[in-house]
Amino acid sequence: MAIGQVLGISDNSVNVTVKRIGGGFGAKIDQCNIISTAAALAATTIRKPVKIVVDLDTNMTIYGGRDPFYSTYKVGVDDQGLLQAVQATITSDSGYTGTDPNCPLAPDCVPSCYACPNFLVTPQFVLTNTSCNTYCRTPGTFEGVTLMEEILDHVAATLNIDPIDIRKRNLMLNGSTMRVNHCLLRARARLAGKEALAALKAPLTLTVPKNFISDMIDQLMTSADVDARKQAVAEFNQANRWKKRGIALMSMSWPHSVDLRYPFSVLVSINARDGSVAVSHGGTEMGQGINTKVAQVAAYQLKADMDVVTIRPTNTHVNANSSCTCGSKGSDVASYSVSEACKIIQARLDEVEASVGKKLPWKELILTAWNMGVNLSEKYENGPGEVKSYAVFGVACSEVELDVLTGQYLVTRTDLIEDAGRSLSPLVDVGQVEGGFIMGQGLLTTEKPIYDPTTGKKLSAGTWNYYIPTSHDIPADFRVTLLSNAPNPIGVLSSKVTAEPPVTLSFSIVMALRQAIASARKDAGTPGWFNMNSPLTVEVLQRLCLVDPSSLVIH
Protein backbone atom coordinates (compact mmCIF):
# COMPACT_ATOMS: atom_id res chain seq x y z
CA MET A 1 0.00 0.00 0.00
CA ALA A 2 2.81 2.44 0.88
CA ILE A 3 4.61 1.67 -2.37
CA GLY A 4 1.41 2.24 -4.35
CA GLN A 5 0.85 5.58 -2.64
CA VAL A 6 4.42 6.81 -3.22
CA LEU A 7 4.53 5.71 -6.87
CA GLY A 8 0.96 6.78 -7.60
CA ILE A 9 -0.05 3.38 -8.96
CA SER A 10 -2.78 0.92 -8.04
CA ASP A 11 -2.04 -1.67 -5.38
CA ASN A 12 -2.67 -4.56 -7.78
CA SER A 13 0.45 -3.44 -9.65
CA VAL A 14 2.60 -4.16 -6.59
CA ASN A 15 3.46 -7.72 -5.60
CA VAL A 16 5.19 -8.21 -2.24
CA THR A 17 6.41 -11.65 -1.22
CA VAL A 18 7.85 -12.36 2.23
CA LYS A 19 9.32 -15.71 3.19
CA ARG A 20 10.63 -14.59 6.58
CA ILE A 21 12.39 -11.64 8.17
CA GLY A 22 15.23 -11.48 10.64
CA GLY A 23 13.33 -10.31 13.69
CA GLY A 24 10.82 -7.51 14.02
CA PHE A 25 9.52 -6.58 17.47
CA GLY A 26 7.47 -3.64 16.18
CA ALA A 27 9.85 -1.43 14.22
CA LYS A 28 8.94 -3.17 10.97
CA ILE A 29 5.20 -2.54 11.26
CA ASP A 30 5.30 0.75 9.40
CA GLN A 31 8.79 2.28 9.78
CA CYS A 32 10.08 -0.24 7.21
CA ASN A 33 8.12 1.69 4.58
CA ILE A 34 10.94 4.25 4.59
CA ILE A 35 13.23 1.66 3.02
CA SER A 36 10.73 -0.24 0.87
CA THR A 37 9.34 2.89 -0.77
CA ALA A 38 12.86 4.25 -1.40
CA ALA A 39 13.82 1.02 -3.16
CA ALA A 40 10.61 1.01 -5.19
CA LEU A 41 11.03 4.66 -6.21
CA ALA A 42 14.63 4.09 -7.26
CA ALA A 43 13.76 0.95 -9.22
CA THR A 44 10.94 2.75 -11.02
CA THR A 45 13.14 5.74 -11.83
CA ILE A 46 16.13 3.86 -13.27
CA ARG A 47 14.12 0.87 -14.55
CA LYS A 48 16.45 -1.61 -12.90
CA PRO A 49 16.19 -3.89 -9.83
CA VAL A 50 17.22 -2.12 -6.63
CA LYS A 51 18.27 -3.81 -3.40
CA ILE A 52 18.76 -1.89 -0.15
CA VAL A 53 20.52 -3.47 2.83
CA VAL A 54 20.50 -1.39 6.00
CA ASP A 55 23.41 -1.85 8.42
CA LEU A 56 22.71 -1.92 12.15
CA ASP A 57 23.82 1.65 12.85
CA THR A 58 21.60 3.07 10.12
CA ASN A 59 18.73 0.82 11.18
CA MET A 60 18.82 2.01 14.79
CA THR A 61 19.22 5.65 13.71
CA ILE A 62 16.30 5.66 11.27
CA TYR A 63 13.81 3.53 13.18
CA GLY A 64 14.57 4.84 16.64
CA GLY A 65 13.69 2.55 19.51
CA ARG A 66 11.16 2.03 22.24
CA ASP A 67 9.73 5.22 23.76
CA PRO A 68 11.50 6.19 27.00
CA PHE A 69 8.92 6.51 29.79
CA TYR A 70 8.62 8.66 32.88
CA SER A 71 5.78 7.85 35.29
CA THR A 72 4.57 9.51 38.49
CA TYR A 73 1.89 8.22 40.82
CA LYS A 74 -0.13 8.70 43.97
CA VAL A 75 -1.73 5.75 45.72
CA GLY A 76 -4.22 5.42 48.55
CA VAL A 77 -4.39 2.26 50.67
CA ASP A 78 -5.91 1.16 53.94
CA ASP A 79 -3.97 -0.16 56.94
CA GLN A 80 -3.90 -3.66 55.44
CA GLY A 81 -2.43 -2.48 52.17
CA LEU A 82 -5.62 -2.83 50.14
CA LEU A 83 -5.67 -0.44 47.21
CA GLN A 84 -8.28 2.31 47.42
CA ALA A 85 -7.19 4.66 44.63
CA VAL A 86 -4.38 4.96 42.10
CA GLN A 87 -3.60 8.18 40.25
CA ALA A 88 -0.77 8.17 37.73
CA THR A 89 0.64 10.15 34.82
CA ILE A 90 2.53 8.20 32.18
CA THR A 91 4.74 10.23 29.85
CA SER A 92 6.60 8.85 26.85
CA ASP A 93 9.20 10.43 24.56
CA SER A 94 8.24 9.93 20.91
CA GLY A 95 11.27 11.70 19.47
CA TYR A 96 10.83 14.59 17.06
CA THR A 97 7.41 13.45 15.83
CA GLY A 98 4.58 11.46 17.37
CA THR A 99 4.48 8.76 14.71
CA ASP A 100 3.92 5.79 17.00
CA PRO A 101 3.54 7.13 20.55
CA ASN A 102 3.51 4.27 23.05
CA CYS A 103 1.89 6.03 26.02
CA PRO A 104 -1.78 5.60 24.95
CA LEU A 105 -1.28 1.84 25.16
CA ALA A 106 -0.29 1.87 28.84
CA PRO A 107 -3.21 3.09 31.03
CA ASP A 108 -5.58 0.14 30.61
CA CYS A 109 -2.71 -2.21 31.46
CA VAL A 110 -1.88 -0.60 34.81
CA PRO A 111 -4.45 -2.62 36.85
CA SER A 112 -2.82 -5.87 35.65
CA CYS A 113 -4.18 -8.71 37.82
CA TYR A 114 -5.13 -6.47 40.76
CA ALA A 115 -8.35 -4.89 42.01
CA CYS A 116 -8.78 -1.24 42.91
CA PRO A 117 -12.06 0.69 42.95
CA ASN A 118 -10.59 3.93 41.61
CA PHE A 119 -8.08 4.44 38.81
CA LEU A 120 -7.13 7.70 37.12
CA VAL A 121 -4.25 7.15 34.70
CA THR A 122 -3.32 9.93 32.27
CA PRO A 123 -1.07 9.24 29.27
CA GLN A 124 0.86 11.95 27.46
CA PHE A 125 3.80 12.10 25.09
CA VAL A 126 6.47 14.72 24.52
CA LEU A 127 8.58 15.64 21.51
CA THR A 128 12.36 15.98 21.71
CA ASN A 129 15.20 16.62 19.27
CA THR A 130 15.87 12.90 18.83
CA SER A 131 15.00 10.45 16.08
CA CYS A 132 11.37 9.34 16.15
CA ASN A 133 10.69 6.24 18.20
CA THR A 134 8.51 3.30 17.36
CA TYR A 135 6.71 0.28 18.76
CA CYS A 136 8.81 -2.41 20.36
CA ARG A 137 7.71 -5.72 21.86
CA THR A 138 4.71 -5.13 24.16
CA PRO A 139 4.84 -1.30 23.81
CA GLY A 140 3.06 0.59 26.59
CA THR A 141 1.71 -2.65 28.00
CA PHE A 142 5.11 -3.35 29.55
CA GLU A 143 5.27 0.07 31.17
CA GLY A 144 1.67 -0.16 32.44
CA VAL A 145 2.07 -3.58 34.06
CA THR A 146 5.46 -2.81 35.63
CA LEU A 147 4.23 0.52 37.01
CA MET A 148 1.71 -1.36 39.14
CA GLU A 149 4.44 -3.69 40.41
CA GLU A 150 6.50 -0.66 41.43
CA ILE A 151 3.48 0.83 43.21
CA LEU A 152 2.83 -2.36 45.17
CA ASP A 153 6.49 -2.62 46.21
CA HIS A 154 6.32 0.99 47.43
CA VAL A 155 3.17 0.24 49.43
CA ALA A 156 4.77 -2.87 50.93
CA ALA A 157 7.91 -0.97 51.97
CA THR A 158 5.93 1.91 53.47
CA LEU A 159 3.60 -0.34 55.49
CA ASN A 160 6.35 -2.87 56.29
CA ILE A 161 4.28 -5.73 54.83
CA ASP A 162 5.72 -8.60 52.83
CA PRO A 163 5.47 -7.68 49.09
CA ILE A 164 4.05 -11.09 48.25
CA ASP A 165 1.30 -10.66 50.83
CA ILE A 166 0.45 -7.24 49.39
CA ARG A 167 0.01 -8.79 45.98
CA LYS A 168 -2.16 -11.63 47.25
CA ARG A 169 -4.44 -9.25 49.16
CA ASN A 170 -5.07 -7.11 46.09
CA LEU A 171 -5.70 -9.78 43.45
CA MET A 172 -8.82 -9.33 41.33
CA LEU A 173 -11.62 -11.80 41.99
CA ASN A 174 -12.84 -14.44 39.58
CA GLY A 175 -15.33 -12.94 37.13
CA SER A 176 -13.77 -9.48 37.28
CA THR A 177 -13.47 -7.34 34.18
CA MET A 178 -10.49 -5.75 32.47
CA ARG A 179 -10.67 -2.75 30.19
CA VAL A 180 -10.03 -3.33 26.50
CA ASN A 181 -7.54 -0.77 25.28
CA HIS A 182 -9.30 1.04 22.45
CA CYS A 183 -6.23 3.23 21.89
CA LEU A 184 -4.33 0.03 21.18
CA LEU A 185 -7.01 -1.21 18.81
CA ARG A 186 -7.07 2.08 16.93
CA ALA A 187 -3.29 2.17 16.68
CA ARG A 188 -3.21 -1.32 15.22
CA ALA A 189 -6.10 -0.73 12.85
CA ARG A 190 -5.63 2.92 11.93
CA LEU A 191 -6.58 2.14 8.34
CA ALA A 192 -10.10 1.30 9.46
CA GLY A 193 -10.45 4.66 11.22
CA LYS A 194 -12.32 5.56 14.40
CA GLU A 195 -15.69 5.54 12.66
CA ALA A 196 -15.24 1.97 11.50
CA LEU A 197 -14.17 0.87 14.97
CA ALA A 198 -17.22 2.52 16.54
CA ALA A 199 -19.49 0.91 13.97
CA LEU A 200 -18.20 -2.50 15.03
CA LYS A 201 -19.18 -1.71 18.63
CA ALA A 202 -15.93 -2.92 20.18
CA PRO A 203 -16.52 -3.93 23.83
CA LEU A 204 -15.11 -1.72 26.56
CA THR A 205 -14.19 -4.63 28.83
CA LEU A 206 -13.39 -8.31 28.79
CA THR A 207 -14.38 -10.69 31.57
CA VAL A 208 -11.78 -12.79 33.38
CA PRO A 209 -13.65 -15.97 34.39
CA LYS A 210 -10.81 -17.13 36.64
CA ASN A 211 -7.80 -15.26 37.96
CA PHE A 212 -5.12 -17.95 37.99
CA ILE A 213 -2.58 -15.77 39.77
CA SER A 214 -3.32 -16.95 43.32
CA ASP A 215 -2.85 -20.60 42.35
CA MET A 216 0.21 -19.76 40.28
CA ILE A 217 1.82 -17.88 43.19
CA ASP A 218 1.20 -20.86 45.48
CA GLN A 219 2.66 -23.21 42.87
CA LEU A 220 5.76 -21.05 42.43
CA MET A 221 6.23 -20.59 46.17
CA THR A 222 6.45 -24.37 46.46
CA SER A 223 8.39 -25.27 43.29
CA ALA A 224 10.92 -22.47 43.77
CA ASP A 225 11.17 -22.94 47.55
CA VAL A 226 10.71 -19.20 47.93
CA ASP A 227 10.27 -18.99 51.70
CA ALA A 228 13.50 -20.89 52.45
CA ARG A 229 15.42 -18.83 49.89
CA LYS A 230 14.08 -15.57 51.35
CA GLN A 231 15.41 -16.63 54.74
CA ALA A 232 18.77 -17.57 53.19
CA VAL A 233 18.96 -14.16 51.48
CA ALA A 234 18.26 -12.37 54.74
CA GLU A 235 21.00 -14.35 56.51
CA PHE A 236 23.47 -13.69 53.67
CA ASN A 237 22.84 -9.95 53.78
CA GLN A 238 23.22 -9.90 57.53
CA ALA A 239 26.63 -11.55 57.24
CA ASN A 240 27.99 -9.62 54.23
CA ARG A 241 28.69 -5.92 53.77
CA TRP A 242 30.00 -5.70 50.21
CA LYS A 243 27.89 -8.32 48.53
CA LYS A 244 24.13 -8.34 48.77
CA ARG A 245 21.37 -10.58 47.56
CA GLY A 246 17.73 -9.98 46.75
CA ILE A 247 14.80 -12.17 45.84
CA ALA A 248 11.44 -10.98 44.52
CA LEU A 249 8.24 -12.39 43.12
CA MET A 250 5.93 -10.58 40.71
CA SER A 251 2.70 -11.44 38.95
CA MET A 252 0.95 -10.01 35.93
CA SER A 253 -2.14 -10.15 33.79
CA TRP A 254 -1.33 -9.25 30.20
CA PRO A 255 -4.37 -8.11 28.18
CA HIS A 256 -4.36 -9.84 24.79
CA SER A 257 -6.54 -7.43 22.80
CA VAL A 258 -7.65 -8.46 19.31
CA ASP A 259 -9.24 -5.85 17.08
CA LEU A 260 -12.76 -6.75 16.01
CA ARG A 261 -11.57 -6.30 12.44
CA TYR A 262 -8.15 -7.89 12.17
CA PRO A 263 -8.13 -10.13 9.09
CA PHE A 264 -5.52 -12.73 8.21
CA SER A 265 -6.21 -14.25 4.81
CA VAL A 266 -5.08 -17.85 4.30
CA LEU A 267 -5.14 -20.40 1.48
CA VAL A 268 -4.87 -24.13 2.13
CA SER A 269 -4.39 -26.37 -0.91
CA ILE A 270 -3.98 -30.15 -1.08
CA ASN A 271 -2.24 -31.60 -4.14
CA ALA A 272 -4.12 -34.57 -5.58
CA ARG A 273 -1.12 -36.57 -6.83
CA ASP A 274 0.74 -37.05 -3.57
CA GLY A 275 -1.51 -35.55 -0.87
CA SER A 276 0.99 -32.82 0.00
CA VAL A 277 -0.48 -29.74 1.66
CA ALA A 278 0.57 -26.16 0.88
CA VAL A 279 -0.44 -23.35 3.22
CA SER A 280 -0.05 -19.62 2.63
CA HIS A 281 -1.08 -17.31 5.46
CA GLY A 282 -1.11 -13.55 5.98
CA GLY A 283 1.37 -13.52 8.84
CA THR A 284 5.11 -12.94 8.78
CA GLU A 285 7.61 -15.44 10.16
CA MET A 286 10.23 -13.55 12.16
CA GLY A 287 11.53 -16.27 14.44
CA GLN A 288 8.43 -16.47 16.63
CA GLY A 289 7.40 -19.84 15.21
CA ILE A 290 4.26 -18.80 13.34
CA ASN A 291 5.01 -21.21 10.48
CA THR A 292 5.55 -24.09 12.90
CA LYS A 293 2.26 -23.45 14.69
CA VAL A 294 0.33 -23.00 11.44
CA ALA A 295 1.73 -26.27 10.07
CA GLN A 296 0.85 -28.09 13.29
CA VAL A 297 -2.70 -26.73 13.27
CA ALA A 298 -3.17 -27.70 9.62
CA ALA A 299 -1.89 -31.24 10.22
CA TYR A 300 -4.09 -31.60 13.30
CA GLN A 301 -7.30 -30.44 11.64
CA LEU A 302 -6.68 -32.46 8.46
CA LYS A 303 -5.68 -35.56 10.47
CA ALA A 304 -2.49 -35.73 8.42
CA ASP A 305 1.21 -36.06 9.23
CA MET A 306 3.27 -32.89 9.67
CA ASP A 307 5.59 -34.18 6.95
CA VAL A 308 3.01 -33.50 4.23
CA VAL A 309 2.51 -29.84 5.21
CA THR A 310 4.64 -27.01 3.85
CA ILE A 311 4.30 -23.25 4.41
CA ARG A 312 4.51 -21.05 1.33
CA PRO A 313 5.78 -17.43 1.44
CA THR A 314 3.24 -14.75 2.22
CA ASN A 315 2.30 -12.56 -0.72
CA THR A 316 -0.07 -9.69 -1.42
CA HIS A 317 -2.09 -11.62 -4.01
CA VAL A 318 -3.01 -14.79 -2.15
CA ASN A 319 -3.03 -13.10 1.27
CA ALA A 320 -4.34 -9.68 0.28
CA ASN A 321 -5.52 -7.22 2.96
CA SER A 322 -3.99 -9.16 5.85
CA SER A 323 -3.14 -7.26 9.00
CA CYS A 324 0.32 -6.65 10.42
CA THR A 325 2.02 -9.36 12.46
CA CYS A 326 2.31 -7.70 15.86
CA GLY A 327 1.10 -7.76 19.43
CA SER A 328 1.44 -11.57 19.63
CA LYS A 329 -1.60 -11.78 17.37
CA GLY A 330 0.14 -13.14 14.26
CA SER A 331 0.41 -16.79 15.30
CA ASP A 332 -2.95 -16.63 17.06
CA VAL A 333 -5.03 -15.22 14.19
CA ALA A 334 -3.20 -17.02 11.39
CA SER A 335 -3.59 -20.35 13.19
CA TYR A 336 -7.29 -19.63 13.67
CA SER A 337 -7.90 -18.90 9.99
CA VAL A 338 -5.90 -21.94 8.88
CA SER A 339 -7.82 -24.07 11.37
CA GLU A 340 -11.16 -22.91 9.96
CA ALA A 341 -10.05 -23.49 6.36
CA CYS A 342 -8.85 -26.99 7.20
CA LYS A 343 -12.10 -27.79 9.01
CA ILE A 344 -14.03 -27.00 5.82
CA ILE A 345 -11.75 -29.22 3.72
CA GLN A 346 -11.88 -31.99 6.32
CA ALA A 347 -15.68 -31.93 6.27
CA ARG A 348 -15.53 -32.61 2.53
CA LEU A 349 -13.07 -35.45 3.07
CA ASP A 350 -15.32 -36.96 5.75
CA GLU A 351 -18.12 -37.05 3.22
CA VAL A 352 -15.84 -38.86 0.77
CA GLU A 353 -14.99 -41.55 3.34
CA ALA A 354 -18.65 -41.87 4.23
CA SER A 355 -19.56 -42.41 0.57
CA VAL A 356 -16.94 -45.17 0.08
CA GLY A 357 -17.87 -46.76 3.39
CA LYS A 358 -14.41 -47.08 4.88
CA LYS A 359 -11.45 -45.11 6.20
CA LEU A 360 -8.81 -44.52 3.54
CA PRO A 361 -5.06 -43.86 3.83
CA TRP A 362 -4.23 -40.19 3.36
CA LYS A 363 -2.90 -40.30 -0.21
CA GLU A 364 -5.67 -42.59 -1.37
CA LEU A 365 -8.28 -40.41 0.31
CA ILE A 366 -7.03 -37.26 -1.43
CA LEU A 367 -6.86 -38.91 -4.86
CA THR A 368 -10.33 -40.41 -4.39
CA ALA A 369 -11.72 -37.01 -3.40
CA TRP A 370 -10.18 -35.37 -6.44
CA ASN A 371 -11.58 -38.04 -8.75
CA MET A 372 -15.01 -37.35 -7.23
CA GLY A 373 -14.68 -33.66 -8.06
CA VAL A 374 -14.16 -32.46 -4.47
CA ASN A 375 -12.55 -29.05 -4.03
CA LEU A 376 -9.24 -29.63 -2.24
CA SER A 377 -8.48 -25.94 -1.65
CA GLU A 378 -10.02 -23.42 0.70
CA LYS A 379 -9.45 -19.74 1.27
CA TYR A 380 -10.49 -18.26 4.60
CA GLU A 381 -10.34 -14.90 6.30
CA ASN A 382 -11.45 -14.38 9.87
CA GLY A 383 -14.39 -12.01 10.22
CA PRO A 384 -15.11 -9.31 12.81
CA GLY A 385 -15.01 -10.64 16.36
CA GLU A 386 -14.14 -14.24 15.45
CA VAL A 387 -10.81 -14.24 17.30
CA LYS A 388 -11.36 -13.29 20.93
CA SER A 389 -9.48 -11.15 23.44
CA TYR A 390 -8.46 -12.62 26.80
CA ALA A 391 -6.03 -12.25 29.69
CA VAL A 392 -2.66 -14.00 29.90
CA PHE A 393 -1.36 -14.66 33.42
CA GLY A 394 2.20 -15.10 34.59
CA VAL A 395 4.36 -15.14 37.71
CA ALA A 396 8.13 -15.00 38.13
CA CYS A 397 10.60 -15.15 41.00
CA SER A 398 14.18 -13.90 40.50
CA GLU A 399 17.16 -13.94 42.82
CA VAL A 400 20.24 -11.78 42.33
CA GLU A 401 23.64 -11.26 43.92
CA LEU A 402 25.06 -7.74 43.73
CA ASP A 403 28.65 -6.54 44.20
CA VAL A 404 28.15 -3.33 46.15
CA LEU A 405 31.57 -1.91 45.26
CA THR A 406 31.33 -2.35 41.47
CA GLY A 407 27.62 -2.58 40.71
CA GLN A 408 28.10 -5.85 38.90
CA TYR A 409 25.45 -8.46 39.58
CA LEU A 410 24.49 -12.01 38.79
CA VAL A 411 20.97 -13.34 38.33
CA THR A 412 21.48 -16.58 40.20
CA ARG A 413 18.05 -18.03 39.49
CA THR A 414 14.73 -17.25 37.86
CA ASP A 415 11.60 -19.38 38.12
CA LEU A 416 8.75 -18.48 35.80
CA ILE A 417 5.27 -19.84 35.15
CA GLU A 418 3.23 -18.59 32.21
CA ASP A 419 -0.35 -19.35 31.34
CA ALA A 420 -0.29 -20.56 27.71
CA GLY A 421 -3.67 -22.27 27.83
CA ARG A 422 -3.27 -25.61 26.05
CA SER A 423 -0.08 -24.78 24.19
CA LEU A 424 -0.12 -25.30 20.42
CA SER A 425 3.60 -25.96 20.44
CA PRO A 426 5.23 -26.19 23.89
CA LEU A 427 8.82 -26.06 22.65
CA VAL A 428 8.12 -22.94 20.60
CA ASP A 429 6.23 -21.32 23.48
CA VAL A 430 8.95 -22.03 26.06
CA GLY A 431 11.48 -20.50 23.67
CA GLN A 432 9.29 -17.42 23.28
CA VAL A 433 8.97 -17.07 27.06
CA GLU A 434 12.74 -17.37 27.57
CA GLY A 435 13.54 -14.91 24.77
CA GLY A 436 10.90 -12.41 25.89
CA PHE A 437 12.16 -12.45 29.47
CA ILE A 438 15.78 -11.86 28.43
CA MET A 439 14.74 -9.07 26.06
CA GLY A 440 12.99 -7.35 28.96
CA GLN A 441 16.04 -7.87 31.17
CA GLY A 442 18.18 -6.05 28.61
CA LEU A 443 15.72 -3.16 28.44
CA LEU A 444 15.77 -2.79 32.21
CA THR A 445 19.49 -3.24 32.88
CA THR A 446 22.13 -3.06 30.14
CA GLU A 447 20.53 -1.28 27.16
CA LYS A 448 21.10 2.42 27.80
CA PRO A 449 20.47 4.78 24.85
CA ILE A 450 22.98 7.63 24.60
CA TYR A 451 22.32 10.88 22.72
CA ASP A 452 24.40 13.86 21.69
CA PRO A 453 23.23 16.55 24.17
CA THR A 454 23.33 19.27 21.51
CA THR A 455 22.05 17.65 18.32
CA GLY A 456 19.99 14.80 19.78
CA LYS A 457 21.75 12.32 17.50
CA LYS A 458 21.69 8.77 18.83
CA LEU A 459 25.23 7.72 19.73
CA SER A 460 24.37 4.21 20.91
CA ALA A 461 23.43 2.90 17.45
CA GLY A 462 25.41 -0.35 17.46
CA THR A 463 26.74 -3.11 19.68
CA TRP A 464 29.95 -1.18 20.47
CA ASN A 465 28.03 1.14 22.78
CA TYR A 466 24.58 -0.42 23.08
CA TYR A 467 24.83 -3.52 25.23
CA ILE A 468 22.34 -6.33 24.87
CA PRO A 469 22.35 -9.20 27.42
CA THR A 470 25.02 -11.84 26.90
CA SER A 471 25.48 -15.36 28.24
CA HIS A 472 26.87 -13.96 31.51
CA ASP A 473 23.85 -11.70 32.06
CA ILE A 474 20.99 -14.18 31.73
CA PRO A 475 19.87 -16.19 34.77
CA ALA A 476 22.41 -18.84 35.70
CA ASP A 477 19.51 -21.12 36.62
CA PHE A 478 16.48 -20.43 34.42
CA ARG A 479 13.37 -22.54 34.99
CA VAL A 480 10.35 -21.95 32.74
CA THR A 481 7.06 -23.79 33.17
CA LEU A 482 3.83 -23.51 31.20
CA LEU A 483 0.77 -23.63 33.44
CA SER A 484 -0.86 -27.03 33.18
CA ASN A 485 -4.55 -27.93 33.14
CA ALA A 486 -5.64 -24.41 32.14
CA PRO A 487 -7.20 -24.65 28.65
CA ASN A 488 -8.48 -21.41 27.18
CA PRO A 489 -12.05 -22.07 25.96
CA ILE A 490 -12.04 -19.06 23.62
CA GLY A 491 -8.50 -19.53 22.27
CA VAL A 492 -7.33 -21.27 19.11
CA LEU A 493 -7.49 -24.96 20.01
CA SER A 494 -7.67 -23.80 23.66
CA SER A 495 -4.30 -22.01 23.49
CA LYS A 496 -3.04 -18.56 24.48
CA VAL A 497 -0.38 -16.27 23.06
CA THR A 498 3.11 -16.34 24.57
CA ALA A 499 5.48 -13.97 22.73
CA GLU A 500 4.95 -10.63 24.49
CA PRO A 501 3.61 -11.28 28.03
CA PRO A 502 6.87 -12.70 29.49
CA VAL A 503 8.75 -9.48 28.69
CA THR A 504 7.00 -7.81 31.63
CA LEU A 505 8.05 -10.58 34.03
CA SER A 506 11.68 -9.51 33.67
CA PHE A 507 10.80 -6.70 36.08
CA SER A 508 11.25 -9.30 38.83
CA ILE A 509 15.01 -8.76 38.35
CA VAL A 510 14.61 -5.04 39.07
CA MET A 511 12.56 -5.85 42.15
CA ALA A 512 15.23 -8.27 43.41
CA LEU A 513 17.98 -5.70 42.75
CA ARG A 514 15.98 -3.18 44.76
CA GLN A 515 16.07 -5.50 47.76
CA ALA A 516 19.82 -6.03 47.43
CA ILE A 517 20.43 -2.29 47.13
CA ALA A 518 18.10 -1.57 50.07
CA SER A 519 20.21 -3.84 52.26
CA ALA A 520 23.39 -2.01 51.18
CA ARG A 521 21.81 1.39 51.81
CA LYS A 522 20.63 0.26 55.23
CA ASP A 523 24.20 -0.74 56.11
CA ALA A 524 25.28 2.70 54.86
CA GLY A 525 22.85 4.35 57.28
CA THR A 526 20.16 5.34 54.73
CA PRO A 527 17.21 2.95 55.03
CA GLY A 528 13.81 3.44 53.42
CA TRP A 529 12.29 3.78 49.97
CA PHE A 530 14.32 5.31 47.15
CA ASN A 531 13.78 6.09 43.47
CA MET A 532 15.40 3.71 41.03
CA ASN A 533 15.30 4.52 37.31
CA SER A 534 16.08 1.97 34.64
CA PRO A 535 18.17 0.97 32.84
CA LEU A 536 20.06 -0.25 35.88
CA THR A 537 23.57 -0.27 34.47
CA VAL A 538 26.48 -1.22 36.72
CA GLU A 539 27.27 2.49 37.22
CA VAL A 540 23.70 3.23 38.34
CA LEU A 541 23.62 0.23 40.67
CA GLN A 542 26.95 1.16 42.25
CA ARG A 543 25.84 4.75 42.91
CA LEU A 544 22.53 3.62 44.40
CA CYS A 545 24.42 1.55 47.00
CA LEU A 546 25.77 4.79 48.58
CA VAL A 547 29.26 3.47 49.24
CA ASP A 548 31.17 5.94 51.45
CA PRO A 549 34.91 5.90 50.60
CA SER A 550 35.68 6.50 54.25
CA SER A 551 34.29 3.06 55.05
CA LEU A 552 36.79 1.34 52.75
CA VAL A 553 39.32 0.64 55.48
CA ILE A 554 41.43 -2.49 55.74
CA HIS A 555 41.65 -3.59 59.34
Image: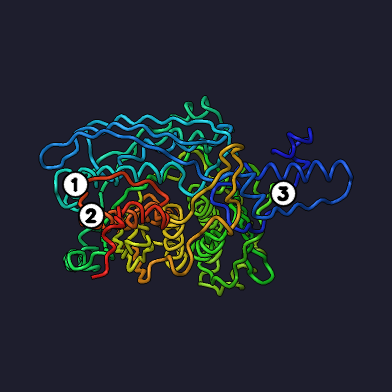
Q: Mark 3 is on which residue type? A: Val
Cα separation, mark 3 vs mark 2, equals 62 Å
Give the left or right position of residue 512, taking residue 431 as reference.
left
Return the disc, 1 or 3, that comes first in the chain's sequence.
Answer: 3
Kind of residue indicated by mark 1: Ala
| Residue 189: x %, y % from top left | 54, 36
State whether residue 268 is above or below residue 304: above
Q: Residues within 10 Å of mark 3 (few under 14, many from 20)?
A: few
User: SS class of the residue under badge 3?
Assistant: loop
Mark 1, residue position: 156
Residue depicted at x 34% and y 62%: 405
Q: Which residue is mark 3?
A: 16
Amino acid type at image mark 2: Ala
Quadrant for the N terminus, please.
top right
Horizontal relation, residue 499 to residue 284: left or right: left
Residue lying farthest to the left in this orientation: 79
Residue 300 vs residue 404, the one in the foreground: 404
Tell me: residue 9, above or below residue 406. Answer: above
Disc number for residue 167: none
Observer-nearest of 506 and 196: 506
Q: Position of residue 519 (x, y in %)?
A: 23, 57
**Secondary structure state at the residue bearing disc 1:** helix
Which numbered disc flags the more N-terminal residue, 3 or 2?
3
Check disc 2: other Cα within 10 Å, few if <14, some if 14-19, many if 20+: some
